[in-house]
Image (cartoon, grey):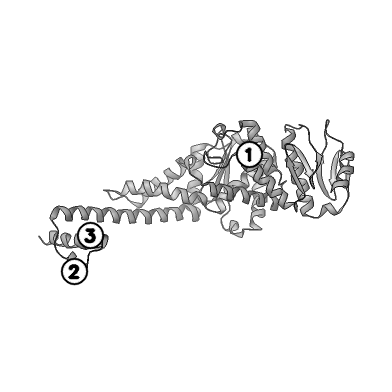
Amino acid sequence: MKTNSWKKKLGSVILCGMIGVSLQAAVQPLPSAQAGAIGGILGTVVQGVAAKQQVEALIKHYDQTEEGRQELFAGYQEKYGVSENYYRKQQLDEMMPRLTKGIAAVDPTILQKPYLYFINKQESFNAFCSMGHVMSVNEGLYSLTDNPDEVAVVLAHEMGHGQKNHVASSMRKKLNVAIGAAMVGSAVGSSALTNIALNVLVNQIDSVSITKKDEWEADNLALDYVINAGYNPGAAAAIWQRVEEKYGKSKKNFAGEIFSPSDHPTHQQRRENYVKRLFEYSGKHVTAEKGVVKVNGKALVQPVAANDMSGAERSYFVLGNLAAAYHNGHNKSDAYASGNTLMLGQQPIMTCYGGDTSAYELAALLNKIK
């Protein structure tokens, strides 16, 4: 009897808070059925709060502790497999410290949580960065490109997500649902919840919903990162040109939902964003359009296809070199030919192949329009 009376009064107080009735009125007992229902609501609310607290604790574990990061890293390796390609692994081992140093120049927090990374055996063109700076690159990325500058753009994009904790925000929602469901109606131990969280984090990375805003932020950070790391910034536009040529203009043809989800910017939008950024970076001197590189509004060169690149893709590499030359003041020096390479001061601009205008002719033209 005492228990039922207590439940009735507690139920009344809760209902009072919910509908704005005065505390004096709330002390009147409710019918037992009503009190039982509200008691159930209270239990659900308490479980919900506990679930949210547990989610935050688990996110902290996997995102901020070395033990959690290593668990996540091992989970991804088990699920996706580890590539044994020595050359690609060596290339990645050389690139990651270089990118880390470049990022540290603008965001020193990266040094507090170094990236854990590996190449997995998946054949789609993709890469991902999860919580805890745990990152993986698909073997399939290299079937599209093994150009170090273009690969660096992909890595820098994912590291942009990592530096801004974009994945944690999306995973928080998934964990709230999974852990909340597990806690309803039963007592779940911390070990079981940790296993649930690890399972969600590893098995649902392919369905993480990164927002369009976050995707743009990662793209723009990637350009800053590759510039600071000394890669050709034109590769940021070039990789999207290659993606379009490989997969077509439709995003539905694109393999890899993390890198280009269906509601995210198109390949063309991303490429043109980089062209615009490079124009600004050059002091508004250099741009590229439809495969033609322009300096101060005048056409300089339209590269031909060479070395497994279309002329359009090559044009963005030329754009990147010219933008860097102008940004770093090399445009104050004369352009000249060094063998088959067009130079502007100390900056190489373009290596000319059969079918291209000669480096000598391009130097003469550049000196007139620069």
Q: Position of residue 306 (x, y in %)?
A: 77, 32
Q: Which of the 4 quarters of the picture holds residue 247?
A: top right
- Element on which disc 3 rests: helix
Q: Are marks 3 and 2 in contact (CB under 8 Å)?
A: no
**Quadrant position of the N terminus in the picture:** bottom left
- The residue carrying mark 3 is 15
Q: Position of residue 184 (x, y in %)?
A: 29, 48
For residue 66, above or below residue 307:
below
Q: Type of residue at label 2?
A: Gln
Q: Give me the C-alpha separation between circle 1 and circle 2.
A: 65 Å
For residue 222, above or below residue 124:
below
Q: Which residue occupies the extreme left position in the image?
A: 1
Q: Which residue appears at 30% of the width and 54% of the height?
A: 47
Q: Position of residue 139 (x, y in %)?
A: 59, 35
Mark 3 or mark 2: name the one nearer the start of the chain: 3
For label 1, the crowd category at 10 Å Cα-Cα, with few meaning under 14, some 14 to 19 and many 20 or more, is some
Regarding residue 366, the answer to whether it shows in the image is yes
- The residue carrying mark 1 is 268
Q: Which of the 4 quarters of the picture holds residue 124?
A: top right
Left or right of 187: which side holds 167? right
Q: Give me the C-alpha separation between circle 3 and circle 1.
A: 55 Å
Q: State the residue in front, 137 or 118.
A: 137
Q: Type of residue at label 1?
A: Gln
Q: Which residue appears at 16% of the width and 62% of the height?
A: 6
